[in-house]
Amino acid sequence: MYQNMTLKELKEKKLISSTNGRPYAGLTDEKWQQEFQIRKFLVTPYSNGERKLGMTNSNESGVWNEETAGSYHGPTNWQAYCSYINDVLHNIRAGQVDYCYYMYQIMDLLKFHYEDLRTRLCDGYWEVWLDRS
């Protein structure tokens, strides 16, 4: 049923929240688990060979330097995001629980662990881990 609906339709019918960001007021873990199952239909998993989020879209490195005429040479937002997601992947693959603060982070983790990623909404964040059964 949900597979044939667009993201816009899902949001209009209030089957999923209208944001990919922080948990909205009134979101309970029970509501989140329902939304999580629906949101899975919107994710295309990576092939089995993908182990981490790539940083190929950005090559900047270094630190802010006034001597370079004010240009910024440091990790880009994308590089920092990839590093965060890859750290979470490393931790949950090691059997640990880690934390996400935005829905889009969970959706990116689903690309790697579509079947075994588990989540729990806590107080303004999500615990994430892999189901080992």
Image (cartoon, grey):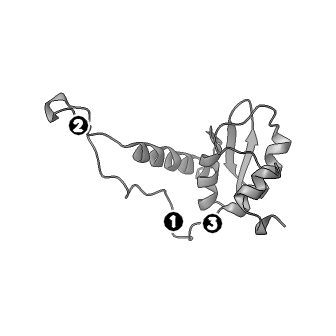
Q: Position of residue 59 (x, y in %)?
A: 30, 52
- Looking at the figure, which quarter contains the N terminus? bottom right
* Residue 64 seen in the figure: yes
Q: Give the Cα separation between the discs numbered 3 and 1.
A: 13 Å
Q: Is residue 61 left or right of residue 10?
A: left
Q: Nearer the viewer, residue 115 or 82?
A: 82
Return the residue at label 1. Answer: 50
Return the residue at label 2. Answer: 71
Q: Give the Cα separation between the discs numbered 3 and 2.
A: 37 Å
Determine whether the residue tagged by mark 1 lies in a helix, strand or loop. Answer: loop
Q: Name above or below for residue 10 compared with residue 67.
A: below
Please tell me in which quadrant of the rendered image residue 124 appears.
Answer: top right
* Residue 115 seen in the figure: no
Please tell me in which quadrant of the rendered image residue 37 appears.
Answer: bottom right
Callout in the foreground (3, 2) = 2
Q: Residue at x 23, y 37 (%)?
A: 71
Outermost residue on the left side: it is: 67
Q: Amino acid at mark 3?
A: Thr
Q: How many marks?
A: 3
Determine whether the residue tagged by mark 2 lies in a helix, strand or loop. Answer: loop
- Looking at the figure, which quarter contains the C terminus? bottom right
Whichever of labels 1 and 2 marks the residue nearer the N terminus, that label is 1
Q: Is residue 68 left or right of residue 86?
A: left
Q: Is residue 129 left or right of residue 105?
A: right
Q: Position of residue 79 (x, y in %)?
A: 40, 47
Q: Nearer the viewer, residue 124 or 16?
A: 16
Tag 3 near tag 1, CB within 8 Å:
no
Return the residue at label 3. Answer: 44
Whichever of labels 3 and 1 marks the residue nearer the N terminus, that label is 3
Q: Amino acid at mark 2?
A: Ser
Whichever of labels 3 and 2 marks the residue nearer the N terminus, that label is 3
Q: Position of residue 132 (x, y in %)?
A: 72, 56
